[in-house]
Amino acid sequence: MANQQARNTGANWTGTQAYVLAIICLVVGVAIGYLLRGSASPASTATTQPAPASAPAGMGMGNTQQPTPDQMKHMAEKQAEPLLAQLKQRPNDPQLLYQVGNIYYDTQNYPDAISYYEQSLKANPNAADVRTDMATAYYYSGDVDKALSEFDIVLKQNPTHANALFNQGMVRWKGKMDIAGAVASWKKLLETNPNYDRKEEVQAFITQAEKHANIKPGQKTDKPAGL
């Protein structure tokens, strides 16, 4: 994912910007590295970047070897088999298509996940949860701009969608170094969802990001502001 991100934004970052982001990450921990599922509750849907997948058969718990892309693809195909069989009977069922997309998402096969999410959205264009997950899949695929455009669509349809606002803030911050935009997303999240489960965490993001609000794209200084 780091290499994918570099293709989109890394070449345009100054050393100061990279340093600021590193400091922020150290302060708020690894939380900046995950996005939230569109549908389930925040407490149950936080996934690290990328979401961990179950180890394939033959890999013991003590084995730290990561599954290969081919193994991940095979896992997805096996898990999706029952749903794909149902899709033969109901090819335009948006929920079935969404569930298949989630399987590919969870096994890090993001292009396949996006394909099924798109098909689901053709049948139900206003499904905010589906579009939120598709946006995160675009982000993990390295397409930051497309991810943000999909979040915009979600939030035009449902301005208070909590996970879309949370994720939009993360992608603005991590993908674009748009601190003001990230803070705006998170403040709107807290204003429109006063009982949000991750309220304290989001407040911590806002506090730390605002310390560096005067660092602008392209700005070069010897020391980041506020440090």
Image: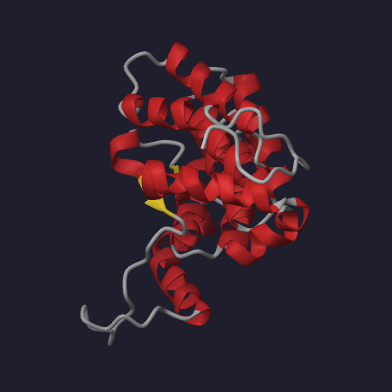
* Image height of 178 relative to 50, above or below: above
* Residue occupying the point 50% across, 74% down: 73
Looking at the image, can residue 131 be seen? yes
* Image height of 44 relative to 180, above or below: below
The one nearer the camera, 203 or 99, is 203
What quarter of the picture does the N terminus occupy?
bottom right
* Image height of 59 relative to 38, above or below: below
Of all residues, the one furthest to the bottom in this rendering is 58
Q: Position of residue 84 (x, y in %)?
A: 48, 62
Q: Position of residue 150 (x, y in %)?
A: 66, 37
The one nearer the camera, 179 or 61, is 179
* Residue occupying the point 53% across, 43% down: 133
* Residue occupying the point 55% across, 46% down: 21
* Image height of 89 relative to 227, above or below: below
Looking at the image, can residue 120 be seen? no
The one nearer the camera, 2 or 18, is 18
Whether residue 176 sits left or right of residue 41 in the image: it is right
Q: Give the image quarter of residue 178.
A: top right
